[in-house]
Image (cartoon, grey):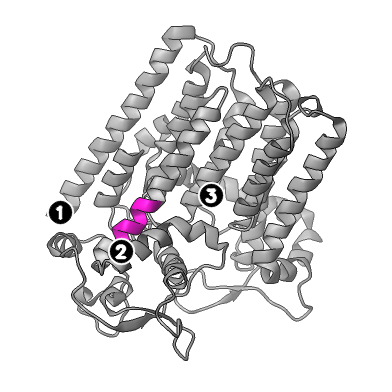
Amino acid sequence: MMLLGSVYSFVLMPLSAPDEVLHYVGAYELSSKMLGTPKPLYDHDGNLRIRKEDTEIDDWSGDNKPNEATVFGMFIQREQILERQEAGFFAKEGGYGYTLQKPVSTTPFAYFFPALGFSFARLISASRFTLLYFGRFFNLLFFAFMGAIAIEKMPFGREMLFSISLFPMTLELVSSLSYDTFILALSFVLLSIVLDYQHREEKLGLKEIGIICLLAVLLSPCKMIYSMLFASCVVVSYRRFSSPLLYFFAIFAVGLSIVLGVLLVNFDSFSRYLRPQADTVNVSDVVGDGIVQETYNRRETFAQPDVFVKILRNTFMIKGKEYLLTMVGNPLGQFDTRVSFPEGLCYLFLLFPFATAILGEKKAIRKKTLNIAQRTVFLLLSVGLVLVTLTMMLFAYTPKRTDYVLGVQGRYFIPVLPFFILSLVPLGLRGKKGEKLARGILLFQILANLVFCIYTYCTLFQS
């Protein structure tokens, strides 16, 4: 993952990943708080102060449009590649400017590692490109470390988890500044710990409960929708605990951790969603041209369940293929069609996690598997998260009189994909031959990613 992520980070320019410029500002803000500079942290309009060296990042002068703020890497161009290659390691400018970009409102833990990279780069007076790559590298390092823990803890399905990590979309996200890196890493660790708890021989105690609670505090506030992943904890039988009382305490503790984490970070947005004001109207700027439109109203929509079901049906019919392709990596970047993993390979990559789950390491499985009830929990969790995601984006982003949900991308469903696969497939059926075939699939994915990156870089450089 470190090797492939580094290659992706080099080929796909800094700030080219989905919403990466917003995550860049969030990490920069946290880095400034870590360092205690500059003072004041914001100007009189509330804009974040940044180094003068870094103002080119989200207001690139190479676009020859002085009145437009072009984000570097938003559209990968040959001029930007040359500029990056010619840049030095250390900063050439002093002083401070500011950015008009606003950070994402989320838990600061989601930006801790890229902010750590930024802080180190600023301490040594690194250039803007060095700063971006330090942030990206620390984010990638975090995912690789947590992914290694997840695979180590998994009693089965290790190859499946690694196969999903080798999706081009996954590699793009974890090699960027996106907080999706944080979400993916913790969701994978959560799955591995839940399965480990269910199949380990030792009884579970306060330490094991504390680990799940820590994950709940970290993951839930990042994107509230992923709090649903902790419903997977119910597959751990009460017999695995040293006493039934401890089992009920664990349920209470995990639930309380989720609630406290969400309320501490997202109290305002959470309260507005639960109890909207009578005169409150949600609006959305769908195309980013400053024209806002009223979105669907929660009460009105639920009062017409047939309309709601019709919208969901239309969404799957119209956008279903797009969700599958964007989950794998077609297209990548800011929906840049020049940076698209081949459609045929996308469908093949979608099959690989299922295949590796079936063919994967049998020695690790022994008699460990999931029963019907546990598979049902994982399946309901997967379907529920997809439906809740669509429902939330219907109310938050989709203008009225639009007959399908807007604003949803396939990458939103990657964290729940392992749960969905484990709910459906038989595990480890083919013994040692299956293990070799599963590893062959993983090798093919690695080589396909490398060839794609080489081809993409050559194509972009010559365009």
Q: Is residue 389 visible?
A: no
Q: Which mark is residue 121?
A: 2
Give the foreground label among 3 and 2. Answer: 2
Q: Residue at x 57, y 17 (%)?
A: 427
Q: Residue at x 69, y 26 (%)?
A: 198
Query: Image quarter for residue 129?
Result: bottom left
Give the foreground label among 1 and 2. Answer: 2
Q: Position of residue 194 (x, y in %)?
A: 65, 33
Q: Residue at x 71, y 20 (%)?
A: 371
**What is the three-letter code of the residue carrying label 3?**
Ile
Query: Image quarter for residue 120?
Result: bottom left
Which residue sits furthest right? 245
**What is the three-letter code of the residue carrying label 1?**
Phe
Q: Position of residue 183 (x, y in %)?
A: 53, 49
Q: Which residue is mark 1?
A: 461
Q: Which mark is residue 183?
A: 3
Q: Position of residue 128 (x, y in %)?
A: 26, 68
Q: Position of residue 87 (x, y in %)?
A: 16, 65
* N-terminal-most mark, 1 or 2: 2
Instruction: Give the crowd class for mark 1: few <14, some 14-19, many >=20 residues within 10 Å.
Output: some
Q: Magenta region: which residues?
A: 131-138
Main SS, magenta residues: helix
